[in-house]
Amino acid sequence: MGNETRPRIALGFLHGDKILKNVSRPGAKPVELDERLISMTDVHVLDPARHLPQAEVTRLRSSGPAARVELPGGVMAWSVTRYDVVRRLAEDDRLSRDARQHWPGLAEVPEGWPLAPFLLSPTVLNAYGADHRRLRDVMEAAFAPERLEQLGAHLIRRLPGLLAELGAPGSGQVVDVRADFAQVIAGETLCDLFGVPRERWADARGAMSDLLSPSEDPGVAAAQLDSALGFLAGLVESKRTSPAADMASTLAHDPGMTDEERVLALAVTIAGGVPATTDLIANAVADLLGHPDQLAAAVDGEVSWSEVVDETLRFDAPVQHMPLRYAVQDIDLGEGVVIRRGDPVLLGFGAGGRDPERHGDTAAVFDVHRLDKAHVAFGHGVHRCIGARLGRIEATLALAALFEHFPGLEPAVDVGTLRPLPTFVFGGRTEVPVRL
Ligand code: HEM
């Protein structure tokens, strides 16, 4: 599989190809697919390097509680798009995220497989059972409510400067809200969370960019990875002698973690936190600008900014899928669908929020006024997003400040023409240009 099919925003630090070579077991038997089950359902071909259109999601949902899908390299998996089934499976411990332990088919995936970067990092995201709990417990300590309150207060103080840097209200200047505002907030908030000294924020943001958007050139990408992980290792090391109330210090002083685990915990927080928060803010701006009456309701305080954030999460989830999970045992979903032990499963966190079974005929309509905004955009169960509260705080503060500071903010292009990111993992737009 060539590089051209790889999602542009890869979790670069995971460097799937490299790790894959180390874990491949050449002698392993291919996964045996249950031909009888496959013939009972349609097989949909899913391209990870393409946004999954709503019409295809609807087709997948109508196929059953799980639909048979083909991923690149002929890898067969199950796609789950119904709200209640996504929730049920996300909390079912018969599904694991640990490919090394629970996916026999891993040995067969072609080198350079585009999804490999997502599933091979030895981090909390891909850990199972007691190992997951151990890694997650340490990280959770860094997201204590009083700490999040402090991070929110710091963001409130930084916002006037960030807004001023965008340009003058009413100037007619065009800026990209996604890159120039949302991404800055997401990156800087993680600098603050980690405890990066203020004078090194620019370096930290450079390391984040190296991790999230590595070069297509493998040599350059390897150097970027080394440099970014080196930066994070240096940060953890500095906290051994001068600890403070921050995530890097918490990790540095946990007695049960290895040095590699400490650094990867920061890296997975970057991978989980930066793109998703960026797209949450940018998607909300795009959706509101596309619905001026709803924007007016939010600006007038008729609906709260947190309701806007929830409706954006439901309608326009920043994380559509986070590949993959694997059945540890057979799972009978009813309607004749049995997920067999070892089968990979793709949970549709974005699709779940748009399920008409839950939200009726208007499920695919953006409506900040709807009373029930239930979604699974942060996942559910033991892997539920560790940064959900922080992401919400950032998005709520950012939206309120942006629309207050720029009362005449308008789209610089027709919002209907904004291009989706070329991936089925993240649900953002490539850019969101606005006129100040
Ligand atoms: C604001 C928008 C965000 C969205 C929509 C989002 C979405 C998600 C989803 C769907 C998962 C579950 C993955 C799964 O079960 O397969 C997840 C996990 C995770 N998220 Fe977020 N996330 C957001 C923000 C953040 C932030 C701000 C951080 C960190 C500062 C973060 C860090 C993580 C981590 C570390 C995990 C893995 C947790 C585990 O496996 O136990 N996320 N996120």
Image (spheres, rainbow, N blue to C red):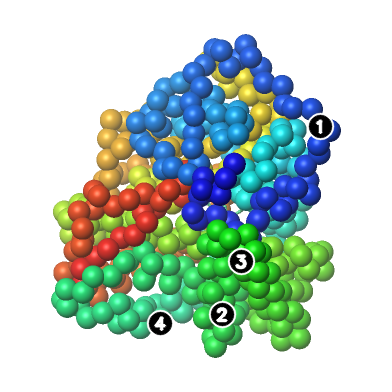
Q: Amino acid at mark 2?
A: Asp
Q: Which mark is residue 28?
A: 1
Please name the residue shown 75% across and 63% down the image.
Answer: 261
Report the side of 86 relative to 414 (left or right): right
Around disc 2, counting alpha carbons within 10 Å, would you say few (fewer than 14), some (14 to 19), or many (20 or more)?
Answer: some
In the image: residue 15, left or right of residue 294: right
The answer to whether mark 2 and mark 1 are in CB contact below 8 A is no
Q: Amino acid at mark 3?
A: Val
Residue at image mark 2: 203
Please tell me which residue is depicted at 35% across the width and 45% down the height of the picture. 315
Select label 2 or label 4 by which is in front. Answer: 2
Gap between marks 3 and 4 measured at Cα: 37 Å
User: Marks 3 and 1, Cα distance to the nearest angstrom?
Assistant: 33 Å
Dot label at residue 157: 4
Q: Quadrant of the C terminus?
A: bottom left
Q: Nearer the viewer, mark 1 or mark 4?
A: 1
Q: Residue tagged by mark 3?
A: 220
